[in-house]
Image: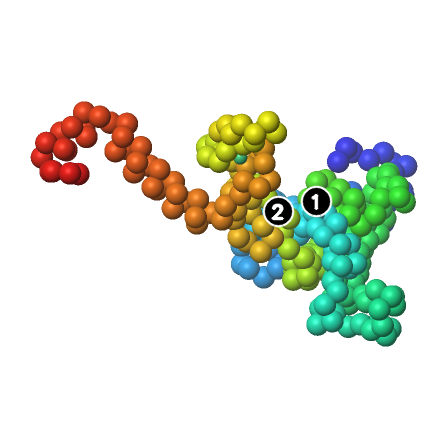
């Protein structure tokens, strides 16, 4: 943060600092005695001289804000598509064509996240009125912005109760979101080409030019998929078994001198 002008200091919310009276936010940061240990109670030293949080809790706060940002789409989807009766309480009748039931767990998680993000924001605009936020930014965008730029602000707040409330509200919202959503699908390129055949449409069979990627599904299972043909996929354990067999065959047939030597010592190997 750049040094605020006098006019800006006048606009800032004031905090009571022992020996200094009620002073603007930017000055309160400089004159507050920060706690010796992280206020979350883990007995770790604060990450910085002016911080209420240790490095671990600082990272956790950033992670939780990022999680709210990253999973907002999943929450939207879960809200609209959780349609097994056991998934949530049904609103209205169960007649076909009636209003879609709302998954209360999902809407509650979204509510917690919204509350956490907007509470931080409310304090932030009081402390730093020159920080501009547009009203069109939703919870999703704001959570991402807080994670990128304002974790230090939250951690170093001169009123440690502000830090504590923000940390706890964000933590609770993030854990609830984890319960009702799955992590997004992730992919991992694999240094191997597809071993299946590819039909370019003229009836000829050619080795598939596809590269392989490991795809981790939301339920944690991994499949190996081909970049060229969506039908060329295989569960990871099967692929690993095939790889082992291929490695063994490769050793047997690529090293002719070794094979000859082996053949001389053990018949039929
Ligand atoms: Zn801590
Ligand atoms: Zn393929």
Q: Which residue is mark 1?
A: 147
Q: Can you give x and y, in whole percent of width and height, for residue 89 in the image?
A: 77, 72
Left or right: where 217 falls relative to 165: left
Which marked residue is nearer to the observer: mark 1 or mark 2?
Answer: 2
Number of residue marks? 2
Quadrant, the C terminus: top left
Left or right: where 132 falls relative to 233: right
Callout 1 environment at 10 Å: few (<14), some (14 to 19), or many (20+)? many
Above or below 250: residue 24: below
Q: Can you give x and y, in whole percent of width and height, for residue 147 in the image?
A: 70, 44
Question: Secondary structure under badge 1?
Answer: helix
Asked whether mark 1 and ligand 1 are closer than 8 Å, the reply comes as no
Callout 2 environment at 10 Å: few (<14), some (14 to 19), or many (20+)? few
**Which dot marks residue 185?**
2
Identify the residue shown where x is 89% and y is 43%. Answer: 136
Identify the residue shown where x is 46% and y is 35%. Answer: 195
Identify the residue shown where x is 83% and y is 64%. Answer: 100
Which of pointers 1 and 2 lies earlier in the amino acid sequence? Answer: 1
Left or right: where 38 falls relative to 206: right
**Which dot marks residue 222?**
none
Q: Can you give x and y, in whole percent of width and height, for residue 157 in the image?
A: 72, 50
Q: Residue furthest front?
A: 203
The reply to whether residue 107 is in sight is yes
Quadrant, the N terminus: top right
Q: Residue furthest top?
A: 257
Asked whether mark 2 and ligand 2 are closer than 8 Å, the reply comes as no
């Amino acid at each position: 943060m750049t040094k605020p002008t006098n006019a800006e200091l006048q606009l800032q919310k004031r905090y009571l600092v022992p020996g200094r009276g009620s002073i603007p936010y930017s000055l309160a940061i400089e004159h507050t005695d920060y706690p010796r240990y992280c206020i979350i109670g883990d007995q770790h030293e604060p990450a910085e001289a002016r911080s209420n949080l240790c490095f671990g809790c600082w990272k956790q706060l950033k992670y939780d804000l990022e999680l709210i940002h990253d999973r907002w789409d999943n929450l939207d989807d879960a809200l609209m598509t959780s349609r097994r009766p056991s998934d949530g309480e049904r609103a209205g009748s169960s007649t076909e064509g009636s209003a879609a039931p709302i998954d209360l767990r999902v809407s509650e998680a979204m509510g917690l996240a919204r509350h956490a993000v907007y509470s931080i924001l409310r304090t932030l605009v009081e402390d730093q009125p020159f920080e501009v936020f547009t009203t069109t930014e939703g919870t999703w965008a704001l959570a991402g912005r807080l994670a990128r730029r304002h974790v230090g602000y939250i951690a170093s707040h001169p009123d440690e109760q502000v830090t504590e409330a923000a940390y706890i509200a964000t933590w609770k919202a993030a854990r609830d979101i984890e319960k009702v959503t799955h992590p997004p699908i992730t992919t991992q390129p694999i240094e191997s080409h597809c071993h299946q055949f590819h039909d370019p449409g003229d009836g000829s069979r050619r080795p598939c030019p596809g590269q392989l990627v490991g795809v981790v599904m939301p339920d944690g299972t991994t499949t190996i998929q081909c970049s060229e043909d969506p039908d060329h996929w295989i569960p990871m354990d099967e692929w690993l078994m095939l790889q082992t067999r291929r490695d063994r065959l490769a050793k047997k047939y690529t090293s002719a001198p070794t094979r000859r030597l082996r053949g001389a010592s053990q018949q039929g190997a």
